[in-house]
Amino acid sequence: MSQLITILNGPNLNLLGKREPEIYGHATLADVQADCSAVAQEFGLTCELKQSNIEGELVDMIHTCRETSAGIIINPAAYTHTSVAILDALNTFDGPVLEIHISNVHKREEFRHHSYVSKRADASIVGMGVEGYALCMRHMGSLLAK
C-alpha cells in the first residue's frame, strides 16, 4: 500500500491561475495535482490536494491527516502570517510537514515575512512558483525513504 501525502492549500488558492497571474502564474490547482501525482509515483506515494478558504476547515483537514497521511505539504496562504490554530494543529501531526509559497514572501509586504507554519515545518520552499509543489513532493519522497 502506498503512503498518502496530503497537499493543503489555504484561502484564495482556489483562484490559482485566475488571480494575480503576474504573482502566481497561470497554472491551476489541477495542474499542481497532476505534477505532484507524477512525482509521488516515482517514490511509490500517492497524493491528494485539498483547499479551503476557512481556517477551521484547514485545522480539521490537518487533524484527519493524523490518521490518513504520511506527510503534509501545506500552502496556508494568508493564514501563514496569522494562524496559531494551524500551527497548533500541525504540531499534533507526527510526520514530515513541508511549507510551500508560490511567491517569494520575503520580497513582498513586511507582514508576509513572518510565518507561524515555519515553526513546525521541516523545510520551506518559497518563490519557485507552482514548481515548488513538485519540489516539495520530491523532498517528501526523500524524507520518507530514509
Image (cartoon, grey):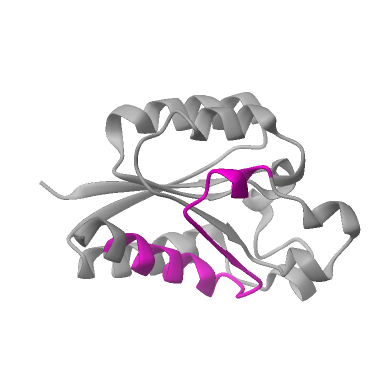
Residue 37, x across and y down, in percent: 32, 62
| Residue drawn 50% across the image and 35% down it | 90
Residue 112, x across and y down, in percent: 81, 55
State whether residue 67 is above or below residue 71.
above
State whether residue 3 is above or below residue 31.
above
Residue in the foreground of this view, choosing between 3 and 11: 3
Is 117 magenta? The answer is yes
Left or right: residue 130 compared with residue 111: left
State whether residue 146 is above or below residue 86.
below
Is 51 magenta? The answer is no
| Residue drawn 49% across the image and 32% down it | 91
Residue in the foreground of this view, choosing between 26 and 77: 77
| Residue drawn 44% across the image and 64% down it | 136
- Which residue is at the far right? 110
Left or right: residue 79 compared with residue 3: right
Residue 138, x across and y down, in percent: 35, 69
Q: Which residues are magenta?
A: 116-141
| Residue drawn 68% across the image and 54% down it | 15
State whether residue 45 is above or below residue 62.
below
Residue 106, x across and y down, in percent: 78, 66
Q: Quadrant of residue 142?
A: bottom left
Q: Quadrant of residue 120?
A: top right
Where's the C terminus, which quadrant? bottom left
The count of marks equals 0
